[in-house]
Image (cartoon, rainbow, N blue to C red):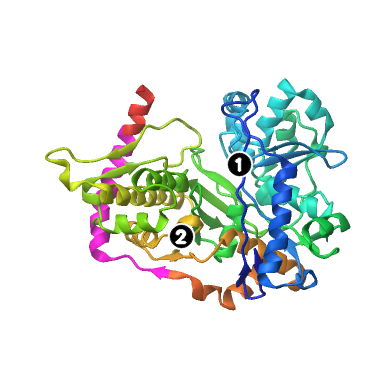
Amino acid sequence: MIFDNAGRPLAEVGRAWSYDAPPDIAPWGREFDADHFWSLLRQATREAMHAADVSPERIAAVATTGQRLATVFLDGAGRELYAAPNLDLRAVLEGTRLLNEHGPRIHAVTGRLPPYLFASARWLWFAAHHPEVCEQTRAVLAINDWLAFRLSGEIASEPTNAAESGLFDVRARGWSDEMCRMAGLPARDCPPLRRAGEVIGGVTARAAEQTGLAAGTPVVVAGADTSCGLLGMGVIQPGESGVVAGWSAPAQVVTTGPVFDPQAALWTSCHLLPERWVLEGNAGPAGSAHRWACNMLLGDDAWEAFDALAAGAPAGAGGALGFLGTRIADYNNPRLLWGGWLMPLAGPLDGVGRAELARATLENITFAVKANLERVATLAPMSGPVRLGGGLARSQLLPQILADVLGRPVEAYPGHSVSALGAAMCAAAGVNFEGDVARAALAMLSLGRVESAQRLEPRRKAQAEYLDAFERWTRAYAGLAQLSEQL
């Protein structure tokens, strides 16, 4: 994506990609071809500049963002030894061992459990199955740290990415020697930490030739996608909350210091601003559930039709309840949940059709977000509207349902990727605001971004209907959790 100084998008280009599951890690493991992904991004970069009619010399700075928990191992020559998305579950056994042997201590230092997806557990897997990879590795990076390296040749990370590794002290905002020793990972392999908004180098001659960018264009540190998404919505003050609802739906509240959940059910992490942290309850695969229901009820690529279908059912979906993937965060007790659609069977089923099932799917997502926000708010009080970004913010109906369910205003950002905008704010900070990310974000927001936000107020009648529906949903959720243990 290319943005102007006011945060307005000038071009957006995407490429589809997929993951591999080699036989030795199937069915749970996932990898990606780093060279192939880089080639797609190179093509998209050139196409974006063409679409925006912007010469390479006019690009003031570049920043990258990417999915949390995705990991790349580099050798001493900068070659990729391992590259995998956040879905790589090859290290479940290693993560289980870490959880059983060191769970309380891991949570006390890193602010999060379980460690199945962390780089620390994946390192243990390689130590057991491919020790030569560990011997050759000289840098463990998040996916956008790796992209910044491809652009600039510089190895670095920053706290919001490092916090996802299982090797990071979230209080001290620095690498933890203790966690590295626990994983058997040499501390030298943890990259230097820089602040978001800091210039780490320039686009190399090789990267310039590949991408079409001008050599020397500043490459600026940015953070993980969810963290950049909060910044892109202006969620920076203590008590402000945001939900970046894409494949998953992390619900986060900003705090002035690290807040740890005594039950270890929530995640504590860093905000992009150095004096801020966040507390998170993730509602799980909201976007995935939405896509599945859309395909089941209407077929592929029926996003707008799904909204229209759901709008044909009343609030409360005729008594139907959805339990499709989303959940109330309980990271200290991860488990497989059974679910689907539940509906009243007291009489004929004529009152529940596709419209009710579609609406129950949307309500299911908002109920899960509400449950997670309520859990977070017991430790980190919220103020003001809840800001909603990500792919699900494009829905014409879901943001209003969320406002009704929460009983508080929702500001939806449906126009484009708030995570990409947050990265652009970091880039602007690096070249226009002396590295001050907060100033860059507020400048862009004041220059017109706020106008594109859609503010939705809760409607009294729907709010009353949802008080009862949410109570039924939480009771049914608890019952299904018990059933899942029996099954």
The residue lying toward the viewer, choosing from 347 and 116, is: 347
Picture coordinates of residue 289 (x, y %)? 42, 44
Q: Is residue 195 magenta?
A: no
In this picture, residue 134 sits left or right of residue 164: right
Q: Please, what secondary structure does the residue beneath circle 1 have?
A: loop
Q: Which mark is residue 393?
A: 2
* Numbered disc in front, either 1 or 2: 1
The residue lying toward the viewer, choosing from 368 and 151, is: 151
Looking at the rendering, the stretch of residues picked out in magenta corresponds to 455-479
- Can residue 224 be seen here? yes
Picture coordinates of residue 21 (x, y %)? 62, 30
Q: Residue at x 32, y 65 (%)?
A: 458
Q: Residue at x 51, y 52 (%)?
A: 246
Quarter of the image that includes the N terminus? bottom right
Q: Image quadrant of residue 23?
A: top right
Label 1 Cα neighbours within 10 Å, binned few <14 / some 14-19 / many ≥20? few
In this picture, residue 376 sits left or right of residue 271: left
Quarter of the image that includes the C terminus? top left
Q: Is residue 234 positioned above or below 156 on the image?
A: below
Picture coordinates of residue 87 (x, y %)? 58, 37
Q: Residue at x 67, y 39 (%)?
A: 32
Amino acid, disc 1: Ser
The residue lying toward the viewer, choosing from 322 and 97, is: 322
Q: Residue at x 61, y 53 (%)?
A: 225
Q: Is residue 264 positioned above or below 211 on the image?
A: above
Label 2 Cα neighbours within 10 Å, binned few <14 / some 14-19 / many ≥20? many
Where is mark 1, residue-wise? 18
Q: Please, what secondary structure does the residue beneath circle 2 have?
A: helix
The residue lying toward the viewer, choosing from 39 and 425, is: 39
Amino acid, disc 2: Ala
| C-alpha distance separating marks 1 and 2 | 24 Å
Label located before the other in sequence (1 or 2): 1
